[in-house]
Amino acid sequence: EVQLVQSGAEVKKPGESLKISCKGSGYSFSSYWIAWVRQMPGKDLEWLGIIFPRDSETRYSPSFQGRVTFSADKSTNTAYLQWRSLKASDTAIYYCARLTVVRAPLDYWGQGTLVTVSS
Amino acid sequence: DIVMTQSPDSLAVSLGERATINCKSSQSVLFKSNNKNSLAWYQQKPGQPPKLLIFWASIRDSGVPDRFSGSGSGTDFTLTISSLQAEDVALYYCQQYYTTPATFGQGTRLDIK
């Protein structure tokens, strides 16, 4: 069974750094892209970008380029989303999801990680 | 970026009746290499992640009931639920994956009348 299991909820202060994770199982993790999607409270879904764990190739949405960093560890089947300096406007649920190729639907999703940034 | 616009923002339908949600893209999402439209539909229930219902505009994902169907081409697409069940109450999103960044519609909330 394909599963993406994300790390738990986080509460941070503005300016702090954060790294959240997404662990895949039940499939060949290195052979599928992982997307990161943001959902602000009561709001739309936003595509941050994607990473290919086999070689860590990344594609960032221009709206998020420079604000977040994707990484992946093939040895642990885990993808990561990282911020160097959080802002209150980063408060949202962040989902990871799997896709077969760059231009493909998101066929399996993680349960989401709630990130709250507040002073 | 391709802008995806859904209509209506919300609708209420009686149990057993048909529900129709529309999605319009700001440019064609027809993928010429396979002549398929790069359009997906997702269902999101409260407290859950989105779930893929339909891809390539009209192909149901594995396990999705056949009361869900997708249609359309180019820039105009429709998700139809032929006979609404109580468990279909949810938010529904369309998404284009024709180009990056992939973009989603603003969502349509479906309730029981």
Image (cartoon, coloured by chain):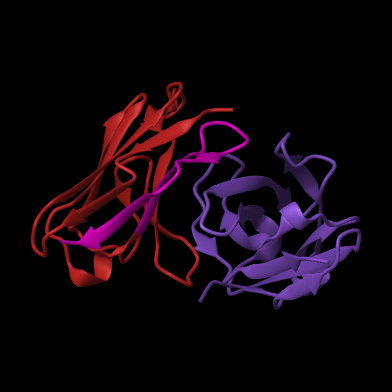
Chain colours: A purple, B red
Q: Quadrant of residue A11?
A: bottom right
Residue A78 appearing in the image: no
Q: Position of residue A76 (x, y in %)?
A: 79, 74
The one of A82 and A12 positioned closer to us in this rendering = A12
Quadrant of the image for the C terminus of chain A?
bottom right
Is A108 colored magenta in this rendering? no
The one of A33 and A22 positioned closer to us in this rendering = A22
Q: Is residue A85 above or below residue B97?
A: below
Q: Is residue A12 above or below residue B55?
A: below
For residue A15, side relative to residue B107 (left or right): right
Which residue is located at x 85 percent, y 66 percent? A13
For residue A68, side relative to residue A1 (left or right): right
Number of numbered discs:
0
Give the magenta-colored segment's residue range.
B91-113
Q: Is residue A71 above or below residue A19?
A: above
Q: Quadrant of residue B67?
A: bottom left
Q: Position of residue B69 (x, y in %)?
A: 23, 49
Q: Position of residue A91 (x, y in %)?
A: 70, 60
Which residue is located at x 43 percent, y 69 percent? B46
For residue A18, side relative to residue B60 (left or right): right
Which residue is located at x 27 percent, y 32 percent? B72
Residue B29 appearing in the image: yes
Q: Position of residue B64 (x, y in %)?
A: 29, 62
Considering every residue shown, the one lying at the far front of the view is A119
The one of B38 and A66 positioned closer to us in this rendering = A66
Which residue is located at x 33 percent, y 54 percent? B109
